[in-house]
Structures are given as C-alpha cells and as structure tokens.
Amino acid sequence: YSGIGICLHPITVIKTRQQVLLGKKSNAKSASGKILHKQLGLYSVIRDLLSSSPGHVSTSSSADKGRRVSLSNARNLFKGLGIVLAVAVPARALYIGVLESSKETIKTFMTKQQDKGITWKRKLGMKSAGEEEYLSGGIKKTIDGGTVSSISYGIAGGLASISAQALIVPMDVISQRQMIMGTSYSSNASGPENASARSVFRSILQTEGWIGLYRGFGMSLFTSLPGGTTWWATYGGCQYELNRLVTQFNADKLGSDTSHTDTMMWKGPIQLISSVCAAMTATALTQPLDVVKTKLQVQKIDNEPATKSISNGNHEFRGLRNNSTKLSPPTAIHIAREIMATSGIKGFYSGTVPRVMHMALWGTIMSSAYEYLKYVSVKA
C-alpha cells in the first residue's frame, strides 16, 4: 500500500492545487457582479509544479513563457508524502479491518433474516406478494444477492470511512498545507516553498492548538460517509452483476453450469470496471463537498484583520473574528460562499479529473490486491 501511495501521490497534489488555487480571470461575472476566475487546468498545475518557481501560478501568458520547466523539480509532485506514508498504513489497516468485519456481520445478519422468512423486498416495496423466490429447501428468498452485496458493502464502507477519519484528517491537514507551500494561499506564502511535516505540525499547534489538526473534521465525515458508502455499494453491486453475467455467459457457452469467474482471467476486468464505475459515481456525488473540505483545511489563520469580502486571487479569507480578538477559522458556509463568488458553480467541481483518476486507480489496485489475498487464503 505504501508503494501504491507513492505512485498516486502526485495525482493528489495536482487535485489539491486545482481545488485551492485560482486561475485567470474570465469574462463571466457572478450574481453580485464580481468577476469570476477560471479553473486551473491540469497542464497549468503540472507546469507550475515543474517550473523553476513553483507555487506562483501566473495569470498571464507572457509570464508563463518566461518560466522554465525542469524535471529536477519533480520533487514538488511529492510534497506531503512523508506524513502520508507514516499515517496511511495504520489508517488503511483500520479501514480494511472495519470494512471486512462489518461487511460480513451485515451480510450474515441479512441472510439470517431471510432464512427466518422476513420479506425484505416486500417491506421495501421491491417485490409484489405474487413474485416469490426460494432458497434450497423451500426457504423464501426476498432479496437477491446483488442487493445484499450492495447494502452490506455500502454500510460497511461508510463505517470504515468514518473510523479511519480519526487518523486521516490530521494527515490531510498537514500534507495538504505542505502541498500548497509557497503559494499565496499558504500560511507562509513569503516563506520557504518546502517545509517538513514537523514544522507544519508545530505551526498548527502554535496558531490553532490541537483542534487545528482536526480542521474540517465534520466536513471530512460528511464527505467520507456518502463517498465510502457510494463507492463500496456501487463496487459491490457491479461486481456481483458482472460475476453473474460472466457465469451465465460461461454456462451458455460451455453448455453447463461450470463457472470460471473465480479465475484471475475474469477477476481483473471485473475489478477494473467495478472500481471505475464506483469512482465516477462517488466523485459525482461528493466532489463539491471535497472541494469545500480541502479549502477549509488549508485556509490560513493569522493575526491580520479578518475580511468579509473577496480581496484578490487565492487568499480571500484570513479568518473570522469571534467575540474576543482571536481569529477563528472560517466555516464551511463561508468557504462555499467564497467559491461561489470567485469561481461560480464550476468551482465546486475543480479537481474532478484527478480525483476520479485517483479513486479509480487506488480503488482498482486496493480492491484487486484485497480480493486476491482473500482468493489465495480461501484456496490455501
């Protein structure tokens, strides 16, 4: 999993910078009359990371021409990798542990209820009283295997996502702030373009306290719960249906009930298609939430006066004053308003392409490795 994380980390860096930084001003205006900014394209973000002065995304073509791109700056694609590697393994272990145990518990529970004759489909309005199916032995089966897989995978995925947030949120806060180091959105825009996770950790404790490490925790839960539930529900349902279609195809082709779906020849394509479908579905549902969460977690907090209007470029909010003189971080509502005012509806979908790529690739590799280990363990 560490190797997978290293390979896919540049996609996360690109996604984060796309979501946080603003592009050139467009000719369009918001409802309030303010000029909207274009979204940063993948090419602009990658060029910026590989340029001789990364972090300062230009807004003019002449400035772009004067910047030199060098592969020696490829290290910028791995900003924040250290803390991710340190936390990702225990977070992933917790995630998979909760996923597997809860999935099997839920599936066993639903199966037992079916064996007792509880008509789940009729209660859910999914089957009429005259359409009965039976398990071997004459026991009524009122939910098919695809529905059981989707429900069990969905609930288990949601529970696993929530459990892992205790480790993932601090990791995200620290790594994402490293990813935008040197930009005008960074809390040390005038400082070094690279800083260690330890220095970022200390900075957060000094300015915000321990609670700063869990900035956006609520939004993370609000994003991960529907995201994890949707991903695993779609993945489980697609996997079941594809396995069923392949089994039927083999049976028709071979003239028998012999199934070859447990061979690696079929497992690979099934894993890939299921993961891509799951990634696209989960991203479509949660992308606006993820954009707000990311900007909320990297939002700077300093001692300068708070502002309520959009100032310029990439640093609109310095913080919001509470009843005392202390600055508190802006809320998700303020961030959403900021995005709407600077980028419009499109701003809520910035970074969609790299996020779909990351979710699809990560999900495919992770689920394939996971299913392969289960397959080997069963065969052994």
Image (cartoon, rainbow, N blue to C red):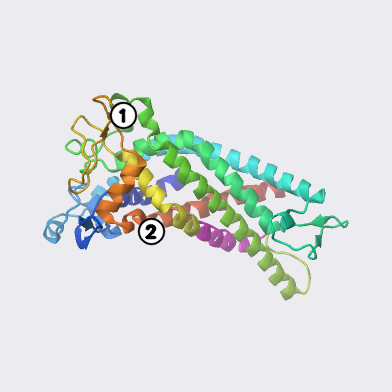
Q: Which residues are magenta?
A: 263-278
The residue indicated by pointer 1 is 204
* In-front residue for pair 343/135: 343
Asked if residue 17 shows in the view, the reply is no
Q: What residue is drawn where x is 46% and y is 55%?
A: 285
* In-front residue for pair 290/340: 340
Q: Position of residue 244 (x, y in %)?
A: 68, 64
Chief SS of the magenta region: helix
The kind of secondary structure element at disc 2 is: helix
- Amino acid carrying mark 2 in the image: Val
Indicate which disc residue 353 carries. 2
Is 67 on the left-hand or right-hand side of 370?
A: left
Residue 302 sits above or below residue 16 on the image: above
- Amino acid carrying mark 1 in the image: Ile
The residues bearing labels 1 and 2 have C-alpha atoms spaced at a distance of 30 Å
Disc 1: CA contacts within 10 A as few (<14), some (14-19) or many (>=20) = some
Indicate which disc residue 230 carries. none
* In-front residue for pair 258/36: 36
The quadrant in which residue 172 appears is top left
Q: What residue is drawn where x is 66% and y is 53%?
A: 149
Question: Is 68 included in the stretch rendered in magenta?
Answer: no
Disc 2: CA contacts within 10 A as few (<14), some (14-19) or many (>=20) = some
